[in-house]
Amino acid sequence: MLIIEKILKSSLFKNFSYLTLAEIVSKAIGFLVIIYVARILGPDNFGKLGFAQAFTSYFGLIVNLGLDVYGAREVAKNKSKAKELLSNIVLMKFFLFIFVYALLFLIVSFLPKDTYTKKVILLYGLSLFTSVLAIDWFFQGFENFKIIAIGRIIRNVVYAVLVFSFIKYQYQLIEFIGIQILSAVVGVAVLWIVSYNFFSLRTVSLAKWKNLGKTGFILASSFFMISIYYNLDKVMIGFWFPDKYVGWYEAAYRIVNLFIILATIIFNIFTPSLARGEHKAFHNYLIVKNLIGLISSVGIFIAHSILIYYIFGKSFAPASNVLKIFSLLIFLIYLNYSLTAPLYLWGKEKLYLLIVGTGALVNAGLNVIMIPKWNIIGAAWATILSEITILLVTIYKCYDNILIKFK
């Protein structure tokens, strides 16, 4: 009883409770909205949305430049640098957004897509600005997960109310994206109300941006590689096949994302203790994360057809076979994430980049070979093989380091 009472009173349990509640509420609301929107828009327009999201994700990596992870890590290590980090990171990301959106506009102008799809991409690109103002990382470094939870819940409640109130017809894709952006701004505003006193232009230094850019570039390169095997497949499907194929593939991916919510929650909670190199925390982190991954994987394999049919409807039936393949992907994601994500918290950004870079190159090559022949099924298997590659490279390169941390 004393042990249970101690656990319940621990900061780790409270942080887990806050983030779990926020993620469950937020993702549940978000998933219900996506189900509704997918049924309203249909596979074709839902595919346009998925393509726009995948395409702009690469530009988002330039805006973020890995600075969120770096900021959370540094605040967790030394809270006296919080004001300096917040001011410099936010302002640096603002100028990156201006550059990136201009680049996006130029590239989209030459895309072999219809005018409507180009408008969808450019509008979705405006959502990158909300990532400039998103400061979850700041509170994560302070281990203040309560305010993060409040912000996420408010954002998703506003999101749901607006979508269910105004999205009624198949042609309202543009309106839907606008609602996404507006609700994200509301969620961000909640965090800034609490933290605006920490922002000060006096602490901004271009000299510090050089160090931020150097470290952030390595992290951003790693995240770019990750984005390749999470988003490149949707971009390629969108170029080779009609938009409805992207819609089917996106439907399966949405369910996968729902089942890996706890992977992100667990990592965010353990980030401060992992950044400090606490061995016991790493031990618990591995056990909890991979157990949840295994349970989720088995559940998806058993119920893949039922999930697609009852969630998205008959028009999304081809997504069922993709989801069956992705049941294995879920476990691999949990396993690989548990082993590789802590590396950049331990200052091993280059090793992390090597691992995910190898997986990304394998994924890109397999996508080029498999998607034209087997469309969305080929894309799914290319992702699986890429995750297996990452696992093998991680074991080869990090076995001694992980074993030491696990003891």
Image (cartoon, grey):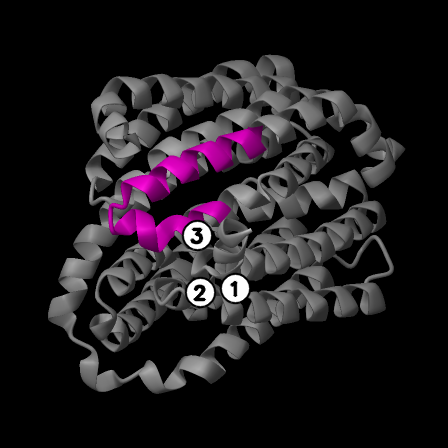
> Closer to the camera, 5 or 265?
5
In this rendering, does residue 110 appear at all?
A: no
The residue tagged 2 is 136
Q: Earlier in the sequence, mark 1 or mark 2?
A: 1
Q: Position of residue 192 (x, y in %)?
A: 46, 79
Q: Earlier in the sequence, mark 3 or mark 2?
A: 2
The residue tagged 1 is 126
Q: Earlier in the sequence, mark 1 or mark 3?
A: 1
**Residue 164 within the segment the image draws in magenta:** no
Label 3 and label 2: CA atoms lie apart by 10 Å
Q: Position of residue 283 (x, y in %)?
A: 37, 35
Which residues, given as a range, are shown in magenta? 266-293
Say which residue appears at 46% left-offset and 32% top-offset.
Answer: 287
Say which residue appears at 42% left-offset and 39% top-offset.
Answer: 285
Disc 1 versus disc 2: nearer the observer: 2
* Circle 2 SS class: helix
Image vertical order of residue 22 relative to residue 319, above or below: below
Say which residue appears at 57% left-offset and 34% top-offset.
Answer: 292
